[in-house]
Image: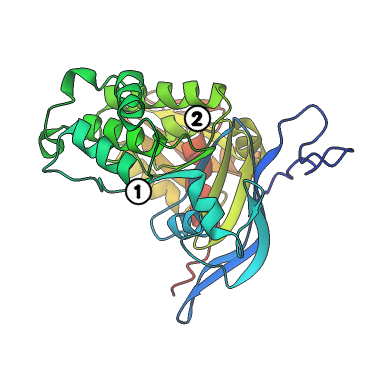
Amino acid sequence: MTAVVAAPPDTNPDGTGGSAGQPPLVIDVHGLNKHFGDKHVVRDFSLQVRRGEIYGFLGPNGSGKTTSIRMLCGLLTPDSGSGTCLGHDVIRDTAAIKREIGYMTQRFSLWEDLTIRENLDFVARMYSMPERAATVQSALTELGLDSRQNQLAGSLSGGWKQRLALAACMLHKPKLLLLDEPTAGVDPKARREFWEELHGLAESGLSVLVSTHYMDEAERCHRLAYLAYGRLMATGTVDEVIHGQQLITYAVTGPDLSALSQRLRTTPGVGQITPFGNTIHVTGRNDAALVAALAVLGGDSRYQIERIDATLEDVFISLMNDATDNFQ
């Protein structure tokens, strides 16, 4: 079972582009499709993102996240569909969209043989920014890069490279940030600092669309979209996505959990089993069937069984299991 939570109405009664009492939409696209040869990579993709919102983009590798992001920012032209990004048509006005967004790719794409300051100055030159020196200095200060401004980019750790890439994205004061797995390979402390920076930017009115594989990062987003094999499977807040799947989950603690997992996987009513340290989550959609499945423990006092709320990870594994691979 999949559930797509309906987006709120797209316009105010006065037509200003936001529902009554809500910020306006910065992304509003409907039915986007993209093929590469005979592969249908993105199918009927629709998305609405509001000003000041951090929107998490999740899904397995090959799910179409990067392709969707590139269609939104004008780097790829959809085969069909329609919509706007920052008020510009995603098919006809791609040049205007590119001028108003910041796009951070999966891989560090700045110049490793230049210093932090030289990298930012070079980007500012490409944008022909007035008062270039002041703009670069402001970026160095705002993102805490001052102390390392003369360090070569190639010698930076993953976290500092990430911070430099974000500074480069922000130089031209974009209205929308598109971040494609920006924290891959970055340590937890640097990831937390990065997300604190994103929330500060969102509070100032910047909108952020970020793809990630990390569940803790997903939970920091205002709303989520989950893609699998080119299809949008679920959207909404974290609570809406979790409750929309109507999963029932039991946590089981005890010995030989690996053997128990193998035994339960073939039991009717068990949808999935996920290990969490010294516990396994046994998940399905029928409570009576799950209780019957766990009865195989026969009252063994070595095991503790507790019904718990499904986690976001439980939901995403379920969504992935429900999806059909469009490359098969």
* Amino acid identity at mark 2: Glu
The one nearer the camera, 320 or 98, is 98
Query: Which residue: 89% across, 38% down?
Result: 13
Residue 62, which numbered label? Answer: none
Q: Is residue 120 left or right of residue 97?
A: left
Farthest residue to the bottom: give it.
Answer: 38
Mark in the foreground, 1 or 2: 1
Q: Which residue is mark 1?
A: 105
Q: Mark 1 falls on what kind of element?
A: loop
Disc 1: CA contacts within 10 A as few (<14), some (14-19) or many (>=20)? some
The one nearer the camera, 246 or 42, is 42
Q: Which residue is mark 2?
A: 219
Q: Is residue 38 left or right of residue 26?
A: left
Residue 304 in the image: above or below residue 181: above
Image quarter of residue 147: top left
Q: Earlier in the sequence, mark 1 or mark 2?
A: 1
Q: Evaluate whether residue 185 shows in this view.
A: no
Query: Which residue: 59% across, 68% down?
Result: 33
Image location of residue 218, percent across then percent down: 48, 34
Image location of residue 86, percent across then percent down: 62, 46
The one nearer the camera, 261 or 159, is 159
Query: Which residue: 79% across, 26% down?
Result: 21
Query: Which residue: 22% across, 29% down?
Result: 160
Residue 245 in the image: above or below residue 322: above
